[in-house]
Image (cartoon, helix red, strand yellow):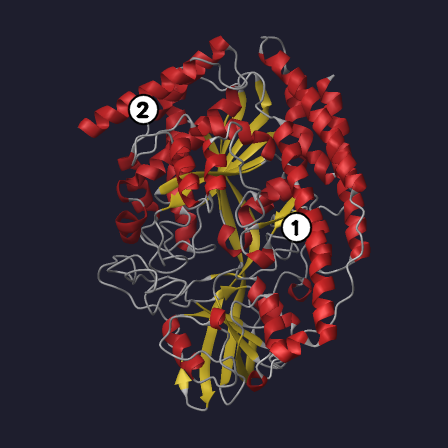
């Protein structure tokens, strides 16, 4: 009781403090009204009810195309309608492979047949249900291959460089790699590019198992039979249904032949447990693996090849299935053609309590809170659209097909797309359009952390200070006066098509950091696991409902939309300076390494017994001309300053701001006007998926990728492309400020 009373006082204090200055985008009078609406909204949210929703939605398997998938969509639809929202299903016909044949066996020097099965547990009530997908990687090729086995660490390009230094070629062989350090789809892609005929991916206990903590069910971490399912679609090319790129996959859509679908991989790929990986790795000989390649299995890690030979046979049901997107609307009272869109996916690989239903249950609770506000007579100024996407797990399918199907309407009407996915207890985080950094800082001041009683912003800042590597870095965070930077978005969830294909301002909001575990994409991503280890009491699910709810409400009712392009200009400037520094460092490093190669230093320093090939000289790094990029960024800074002044003047008046607001939310589309095909995500002018570096993001990726590949002509070309896009945005902002 004392804790609840204290939290209530703190919440009141936050409310009182917020009243001292108007909310961003609101006048003094509309700000006070808005805060009262948010208090009403918060009061209607229930952590207990979120838990009940999560339990109901995760009660059975519901992967794309399954009976459970349709049932979950219909349950969410029924809930939206019961809250008073205008809701319907949008359906798409899409390709989705499920396993028909899975064989993995070691044929020499000893024989071993992989179990390829997760063992159910009595402590987990849904771990032995009919209809659960077997362990597999979607979009693997069908194949029946036999070859010598090679261990390739995490399967990144630099790992193959290291193998080459050891004189090992994977051409015609099967590689085994660890999960981690990159998105899973890059591992078989890079293996194929190096000539491998098959790829096995396993979770090493050093990364995901007993080295991290007690294994499930005693603790949260992956037990020896746990397996991470997942997509290996080549989403660098395009996400969504592989047969209908660029168009919504309605029943009558024109489709590619499957053999022409470029996002389906060319070699068989299979995920396995560390129980199944151990005998395969133990059979390898050849050089001992480098120290940073070794995991935590009780064996000596070798890289092969040698006598260890593996047979893989995979075949899939390539079925056309129905994807069910649930879409609900609250029509805006003043600006019905300006849409604030909120989404989270509902499909899972198995039961999916954490991924995605933690976020989905919070979304459902938000929708109820909005429905309760409607009953009081409140109506949003702008239309609010709530979406529960299908088919995210195999390849962002439901959201991509919706975005492709409604692309012109969305580019005209969408003010912002706000996403969430799985969450757990811990720290507030937001990523997305950098012009919304100040807005998201203010949102973080409006929500109380359920564990500590301080604002979620204050707790996040404490985490940043405690983890900073140096005294200087700690002091910089402590003294920071500007809004905290939000992360750049690459890919990995349903925001991708809205941001990179349509240029719609986008946010991804979540909580996490204290709910680590090994349940990801396994049969153990269950209600029993979630309530024990991820978010006991569902308090952070409720915190997400409040955080996103406030974001939706303020975007829907702001007098002047809270975009500040000065933070975007500052971010792009930082990205550009990083590239200049990276190029200069590469030039200095190359020159020194070439000097050492010529002197024979590396050859003298090598251990002759390890037969490592010494480095060879590389072409010198030329001077790259970044001047046009630098000049365009300076223009953007001036334009964003001018617009900020016009914005400040407008926000103090109660006049008609419709034209200004339309300019604000259409601005990011200028970054797609550079002449690039909209589907070349990896060359998006500002941020794009960092597929070679995990779920991180390559910023100014076209330039960065060309420099990393030492393609200097392409680097200069990409600088020109980015310069054009930034100049286009700068001119657009100048017009908006007039």
The picture quadrant where one finds residue 642 is: top right
Relative to 396, is 442 above or below?
above
The picture quadrant where one finds residue 693 is: bottom right
- The residue under label 2 is 43
Which of marks 1 and 2 precedes in the sequence? 2
Q: Residues within 10 Å of mark 2 (few under 14, many from 20)?
A: few
- The residue under label 1 is 253
Q: CA distance from mark 2 to mark 1?
A: 45 Å
Q: Residue at x 77, y 52 (%)?
A: 715
Q: Residue at x 41, y 63 (%)?
A: 207
User: Which residue is most to the left?
Assistant: 1
Q: Residue at x 42, y 32 (%)?
A: 457
Q: Nearest the camera: 255 or 474?
A: 474
- Residue 200 visible in the displayed image: yes
Q: Position of residue 263 (x, y in %)?
A: 63, 60
Q: Nearest the camera: 233 or 177?
A: 177
Q: Position of residue 668 (x, y in %)?
A: 67, 34
- Side of 59 relative to 502 (left or right): left
Secondary element at tag 2: helix
Relative to 46, is 736 above or below?
above
- Give the number of the mark in front: 2 or 1: 2
The quarter of the rendered structure image containing the C terminus is: top right
Relative to 362, is 169 above or below?
below
């Amino acid at each position: 009781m004392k804790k609840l009373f204290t939290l209530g006082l703190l919440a009141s204090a936050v409310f009182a403090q917020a009243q001292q200055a108007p909310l961003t985008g609101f006048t003094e009078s509309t700000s006070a009204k808005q805060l009262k609406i948010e208090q009403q909204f918060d009061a209607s949210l229930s952590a207990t009810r979120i838990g009940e929703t999560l339990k109901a939605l995760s009660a059975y398997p519901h992967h794309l195309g399954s009976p459970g998938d349709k049932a979950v969509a219909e349950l969410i639809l029924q809930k939206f309608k019961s809250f008073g929202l205008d809701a319907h299903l949008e359906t798409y016909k899409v390709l989705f492979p499920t396993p028909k044949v899975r064989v993995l066996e070691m044929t020499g020097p000893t024989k071993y047949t992989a179990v390829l099965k997760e063992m159910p547990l009595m402590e987990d009530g849904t771990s032995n249900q009919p209809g659960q997908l077997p362990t597999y990687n979607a979009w693997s090729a069908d194949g029946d291959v036999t070859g010598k086995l090679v261990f390739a660490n995490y399967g990144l390009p630099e790992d193959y460089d290291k193998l080459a230094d050891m004189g090992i070629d994977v051409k015609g062989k099967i590689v085994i790699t660890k999960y981690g350090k990159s998105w899973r789809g890059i591992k078989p892609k890079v293996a194929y590019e190096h000539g491998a005929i098959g790829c096995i991916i396993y979770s090493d206990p050093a990364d995901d198992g007993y080295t991290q903590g007690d294994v499930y069910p005693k603790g949260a971490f992956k037990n020896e039979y746990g397996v991470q399912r997942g997509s290996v679609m080549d989403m660098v090319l395009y996400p969504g249904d592989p047969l209908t790129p660029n168009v919504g996959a309605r029943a009558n859509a024109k489709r590619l032949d499957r053999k022409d679908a470029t996002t389906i991989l060319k070699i068989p790929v299979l995920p396995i447990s560390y129980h199944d990986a151990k005998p395969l790795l133990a059979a390898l000989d050849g050089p001992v693996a480098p120290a940073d390649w070794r995991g935590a299995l009780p064996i000596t890690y070798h890289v092969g090849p040698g006598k260890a030979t593996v047979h893989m046979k995979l075949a899939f049901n390539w079925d056309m299935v129905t994807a069910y997107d649930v879409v609900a609307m609250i029509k805006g009272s003043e600006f019905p053609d300006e849409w604030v869109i909120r989404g989270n996916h509902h499909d899972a690989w198995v039961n999916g309590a954490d991924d995605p239903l933690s976020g989905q249950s919070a979304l459902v609770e938000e929708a109820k809170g909005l429905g309760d506000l409607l009953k009081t007579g409140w109506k949003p100024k702008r239309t609010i659209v709530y979406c529960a996407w299908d088919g995210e797990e195999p390849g962002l399918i439901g959201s991509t097909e919706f975005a492709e199907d409604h692309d012109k309407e969305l580019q005209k009407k969408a003010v912002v797309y706000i996403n969430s996915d799985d969450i757990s207890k811990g720290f507030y985080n937001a990523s997305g359009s950098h012009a919304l950094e100040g807005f998201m800082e203010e949102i973080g001041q409006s929500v109380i952390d359920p564990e500590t009683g301080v604002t979620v912003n204050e707790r996040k800042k404490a985490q940043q200070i405690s983890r900073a590597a140096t005294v200087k870095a700690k002091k910089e965070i402590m003294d920071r006066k500007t809004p905290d930077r939000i992360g750049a978005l690459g890919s990995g969830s349903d925001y991708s098509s809205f941001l990179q294909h349509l240029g719609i301002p986008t946010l991804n909001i979540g909580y996490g950091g204290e709910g680590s575990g090994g349940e990801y994409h396994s049969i153990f991503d269950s209600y029993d696991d979630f309530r024990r280890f991820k978010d006991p009491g569902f308090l952070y699910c409720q915190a997400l409902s409040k955080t996103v709810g406030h974001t939706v409400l303020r975007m829907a009712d702001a007098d002047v939309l809270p975009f500040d392009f000065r933070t975007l200009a500052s971010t792009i400037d930082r990205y550009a300076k990083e590239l200049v520094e990276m190029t200069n460092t590469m030039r200095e490093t190359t020159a020194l390494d070439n000097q050492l190669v010529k002197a024979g230093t590396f050859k003298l320093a090598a251990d002759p017994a390890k037969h490592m090939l010494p480095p060879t000289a590389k072409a010198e790094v030329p001077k790259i001309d970044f001047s046009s990029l630098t000049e365009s960024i300076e223009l953007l800074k001036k334009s964003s300053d001018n617009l900020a002044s016009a914005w400040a003047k407008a926000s103090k008046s109660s006049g008609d701001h419709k034209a200004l607001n339309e300019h604000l939310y259409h601005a990011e589309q200028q970054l797609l006007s550079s002449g690039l095909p909209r589907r070349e995500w990896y060359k998006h002018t500002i941020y794009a998926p960092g597929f070679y570096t995990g779920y991180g993001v390559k910023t100014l990726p076209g330039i960065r990728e060309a420099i990393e590949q030492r393609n200097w002509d392409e680097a200069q070309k990409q600088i020109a492309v980015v310069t054009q896009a930034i100049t286009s945005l700068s001119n657009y902002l100048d017009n908006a400020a007039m």
